[in-house]
Image (tube, rainbow, N blue to C red):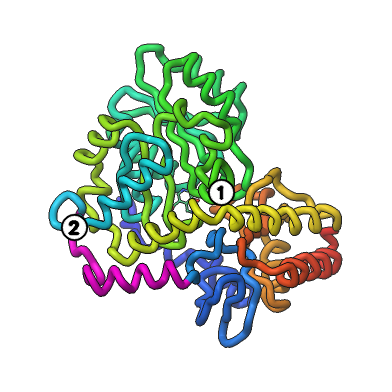
Amino acid sequence: MNKPKDLFKKCYDFTLADDVKAQGIYPFFHPIDETEGPVVSFDGKQLIMAGSNNYLGLTSDSRVKDASIKAIKKYGTSCSGSRYMTGTVNLHIELEEKLADYFEKERCLLFSTGYQTGQGVIPTLVQRGEYVVSDKDNHASLVAASIMAVGQSAKFVRYGHNSMEDLERVLQTIPESAGKLIVSDGVFSVSGEIVDLEQLVALAKKYHARILIDDAHAVGVIGRDGRGTPSEFDLVDDVDLIMGTFSKTFGSLGGYVVGERSVINYIKHNASSLIFSASPTPASVAAVLASLEILKNEPELMERLIRNTDYVRQGLKNAGFKLMPSRTAIVSVIIGDQMKTLVFWKKLFDAGVYVNAFIRPGVMPGHEALRTSFMATHETEHLDKVITEFCTIGKELGII
Ligand code: PMP
């Protein structure tokens, strides 16, 4: 008889995090004790935040904070239920109308996180015998959502990262009669690279596929007044569904999808992650409403964000670092080795610069990187310090 195996054995055997902690180079779950935009405090020590998705710096904008406080006073701290039942307040409807209008689509539907938005859209639309066709580098939440579709007998196929030749090859293998949803990040979350949307739209038309773009890292960064990737390419009408998150440019928490009336209506009445989960809090929704007004009325914030990011990108490139291809607010420095990435991360932390270490499972072995991202509210002195510390440590570790 086989010996019974304890389900928890894998947990008891998992030592990576403890090993890295023992070496003093653990880069995750560090609690910030105070934050004021681009400068944050850990254990009372001030660091420049060069890894946040708070692209326009709106989490500490007094107008956004005041809107949240006002909403708490009026509606309380939670809606205590799902949108479907008792959890809808006026603010949800107001935000859906305003976002549909801003993104130039018929309807919008809010979710409680961006992660749940993918889970609400993909398995709801892609059913038995239908196909999710996904870029290999899509965000983990889209992969998880696609696997949920597989659970209901849909097919999940992937194509080489941003390779339109490979996308066409994959589309050719799918029966013409099957429904297909091509899914791609608009701006890829690890590299900051922009999807080849013109070609993707052309292939979707040729092979009768629908398109879902996850614009989490594009809104407030590219497109007319920050409307994201479809707007950047002037292809808003050709992209069927656009989803995103409130946890980046909008300085809040939650997610949304925009598209045509009947499709959004179908998702609204069938998406499990919407119907069986509590709605975004009044404070979160009110923050987005305030941020949206700022985004529409203050284009100079986006200009500053791009100027700031370009400044660092150029500085690191000139110093000889290998960067992932990007012209958005993400600058990822390729290190290509797990231990070197962790040591580099710790040295930057000690020098007063906070970035993100991307190791397994965030990236494949050999693609380890330090991912930096910038804000409209960084000052030149912050950016200079980031470049200087990268150069000093990069030389010390033999990376440049
Ligand atoms: N999609 C992409 C491309 C993302 O980068 C993220 C967050 N990193 C999400 C979805 C999930 O969004 P949220 O944080 O709102 O759950």
1 vs 2, front mark: 2
Give me the residue at 55% from left, 65% from top. 57
Q: Which mark is first along the chain, 2 or 1?
A: 2
- Picture quadrant of residue 224: top right
Q: Position of residue 183 (x, y in %)?
A: 46, 34
Residue range of the region highlighted in magenta in the rendering: 62-82
Q: Is mark 1 within 8 Å of ligand 1?
A: yes
Q: Position of residue 84 (x, y in %)?
A: 17, 49
Q: Amino acid at mark 2?
A: Gly
Please name the residue that numbered disc 1 is placed on. Answer: 189
Give me the residue at 67% from left, 49% from top. 367
Q: Most extreme residue toward the front, as rendered? A: 297
Please name the residue that numbered disc 2 is placed on. Answer: 87
Q: Most extreme residue toward the bottom, as rendered? A: 44
- Find numbered disc 2 in the image and state the secondary structure of the residue it sits on: loop
Q: Is residue 300 visible?
A: yes
Residue 243 drawn above or below residue 298: above
Q: Position of residue 54 (x, y in %)?
A: 53, 62
Q: Is residue 264 left or right of residue 243?
A: left
Does the magenta segment cover residue 376? no
Residue 177 drawn above or below residue 385: above
Q: Is residue 371 visible?
A: no
Give me the residue at 35% from left, 17% from top. 178
- Find numbered disc 1 in the image and state the secondary structure of the residue it sits on: loop
